[in-house]
Image (cartoon, helix red, strand yellow):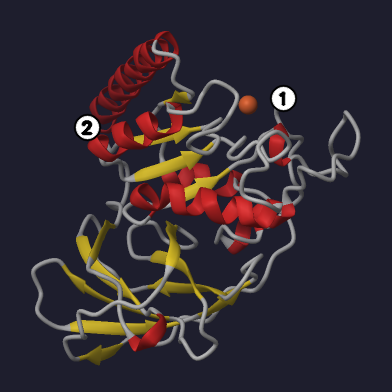
Amino acid sequence: MEREYSKGRRASLAFFFAAALVAALALTAAGLPARAFTVTPVAYLPFVGGGAEVAPPATPTPTVTPEPSPVAGPYDQLHLAWTGDTSTTLTVAWRTWESATTSSVMHRRAGDAAWQTTTGGVRPSGTEGSLHEVTLAGLQPATAYEYRVQTDAGGWSPVLTARTAAQGPFDFDAVFIADTGLVGRLDGLATGAQQVIDEVRKLDPLLILGGGDYAYFDKDKRFGTLDETIDAWFNQMMPLASRAPLMPAYGNHEADPALDETGPDPNDPVWPWNSRFPRPRAAWGPMTTPST
Ligand SMILES: [Fe+2]
């Protein structure tokens, strides 16, 4: 039984790697800056690396909440992560501006009537306002959830959806995105990122892996400072990252100056990026050498 299963898994992996190769060739032929492959999230998590970090907030017991007002105040940069068990947790990050806005997320299993509210804490926002982080725990594996984040003006975001992973080995779709840049970039690749976002939205993967070279801040100064550019990138990715965890690696355009073999580049420090991505605590180790 075990042997049959292993053979099946090898066949499945071979299929997905073959599919990834075909997809990569197709994307390359189309001039799109993306590659795709299939991985197991549990195997991936230990390699998410390093950097200045803030302690994630404790996860309190959710409380039952009445149906919220549908009126949403301002919020942006909403993105999901896996910082714990991929089958029973989801971590939500988003930015608001008012100091009184709490780090609260309400969620329910898709189809259920009652919402539960979980509170968390804040990460460094990099620019204005608060970057909230809340980890939903005690979720059911392989299950669709609806959630809403607290917004300014005492409101709640529209209902968003996300999924937990199954437990144990299972087949799923993951997408690897790198070299996106920001839509409208001035180096001749103005529309590539939007095409990739639209395609990934259709694929609706369980997990999105970021390969780095996200915003090319050394070349693209349209948004101002590096942190303002990171704001723009998270907003650009929100249609994808609000639906599936986005787990980062970094490229040479987010290189750690201390590890950059070509010498420190103050335009491309990795730390402002790293502080925005919730990541597993166990993965806080030294950075690996950036890719080129
Ligand atoms: Fe690149």
Identify the residue at horizontal 60%, vertical 47% (top origin): 48
Image quadrant of ligand 1? top right
Helix, strand, or loop for circle 2?
loop
Q: Nearer the viewer, residue 171 or 11?
A: 171
Q: Is residue 90 left or right of residue 54?
A: left
Q: Nearer the viewer, residue 41 or 157?
A: 157
In the displayed orientation, state which residue is furthest to the right. 263
Residue 146, given in percent of the width and then of the height, sits at 22, 67
| Residue 75 in the image: above or below residue 43 | below
Which quadrant holds the N terminus? top left
| Residue 3 in the image: above or below residue 26 | below
Identify the residue at horizontal 58%, vertical 73% (top origin): 56
Q: Is residue 291 left or right of residue 261?
A: left
Which residue was labeled with disc 1?
A: 292
Which quadrant holds the C terminus? top right
| Residue 90 in the image: above or below residue 171 | below
Q: Residues within 10 Å of mark 1 (few under 14, many from 20)?
A: few
Q: Nearer the viewer, residue 3 or 175?
A: 175
Residue 224, given in percent of the width and then of the height, sits at 67, 51
Helix, strand, or loop for circle 1?
loop
Q: Residues within 10 Å of mark 2 (few under 14, many from 20)?
A: few
Identify the residue at horizontal 91%, vertical 34% (top origin): 263
Kindly report which numbered mark, 2 or 1, lies closer to the viewer in this rendering: 1
What amino acid is at disc 1? Thr
Which residue was labeled with disc 2?
A: 1
Q: Is residue 267 left or right of residue 214?
A: right
Total residue callouts? 2
